[in-house]
Image: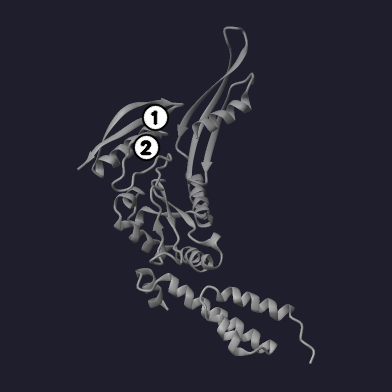
Amino acid sequence: MYDILAMLRSGEIHPMHAVAVFTILVSMSINVIVSKVKGYKVRYAIAAALPPYLNIWFSVGYILMAIFKKKQSQ
Amino acid sequence: MQSKAFNKIANLTDNDSMSSVHNTHVISVSTGVVKSFVVSSQPRINRHGELETLISTQAIPAPSYLVNQTSVAWNQYKEKSSKLFVPIESGFESAWSITQNTSNRSRLDDWLEENHSINYWSRQISSTFGGALWSPLAGTEWEIVFSDDSSLIMVASTTTSSRLKLSYKAMSAEDADGNRIPDAGMSVQGEYTFSNERNLSNFLGKLSRYGIRYVVVHSGSVGGRKRVTITDISRY
């Protein structure tokens, strides 16, 4: 972890890339947890977490959908 | 500070018919300075036959317990303040050493990272990661204050920065009186105002020290403050 910070500070890793990876990890964990809890398809949850920077907004939408979407009657 | 002691006693003893002597202590927590004065108030009849109060102030050494208490309060103020204070032990005595020596900017960032780690990383992460999600958080500016009261502004990195380091904001350095400290290679031409003779000679001394030749075209005093107009000739 310390090495990664040192590389970020020296410019060997660009902050943009670090933030992209960070947002993918955070939004993927949020999406997967929500999909497991609500019984949605996991592959869509993972796909929504892949585009960097957009993914965090997809996650917000995913959470809102999980809260407000009513279950369709069979 | 002397004028504060003067005004306080002048208001307190205005039109008093008895003379009095007051020990007055003036404390500034934001600068950690304490000064003590003996202020004497004396009534007298002026040539129109009216009562007037004569006030005189004399500086005396501040009591040591007040100096200690002010020092403690100042340290607490520095910890709570959003400004980051750089003591002389850091090796950076003034904002001059950052503006004129560009390699010191990276060293100052390293020093802040080592000595103000929590402050440093909370600002960097909120600007870089927070700024990626919400633009008002990106590239926040932070004031760094040096032991001679000069200051400058460092900008937190964003996702568009090449390195995760605080960067110096160009032309942001000021001395204790708010006069702009020139960046390396910049002109010093302009009008400068100083609160006392010492600050003025410090400023001119720094210009000479960093090889900036100048001419004082005009000097004077405005409202008790020394004012000089400087123009530079050329650099060595």
Q: Work out whether residue B61 or residue A23 is closer to the camera in this orientation and state it.
A: A23
Crowding around mark 2 (Cα neighbors within 10 Å: few <14, some 14 to 19, many 20+) is some
Q: Who comes first in sequence, dot 2 or dot 1?
A: 2
Against A39, is B87 above or below? above
Q: CA distance from mark 2 to mark 1?
A: 9 Å
The residue depicted at 64 percent of the width and 18 percent of the height is: B17
- From this view, report whether residue A49 is shown above or below residue B175: below
Q: Mark 2 and 1 residues: CB-CB less than 8 Å, in contact? A: yes
Identify the chain of the residue marked 2, using the numbered disc in the image: B
Which residue corresponds to the image point at 49% horizontal and 41% vertical from the top-left? B34
Secondary structure beneath dot 2 equals helix
Expressed as whole percent of the image width and height from the top left, the position of residue A38 reads 69, 87
Query: How many residues crowd mark 1 within 10 Å: few (<14), some (14–19), many (20+)?
Result: some
Q: Which residue is mark 2?
A: B199
* Chain assignment, label 1: B
Check the image and report above or below for A19 versus B22: below
Q: Please state which of residues A29 and B153 is positioned toward the viewer in this rendering.
A: A29
- The answer to whether one can see residue B162 in this image is yes
SS type, badge 1: strand
Quadrant location of residue B180? top left
Mark 1 — residue? B226
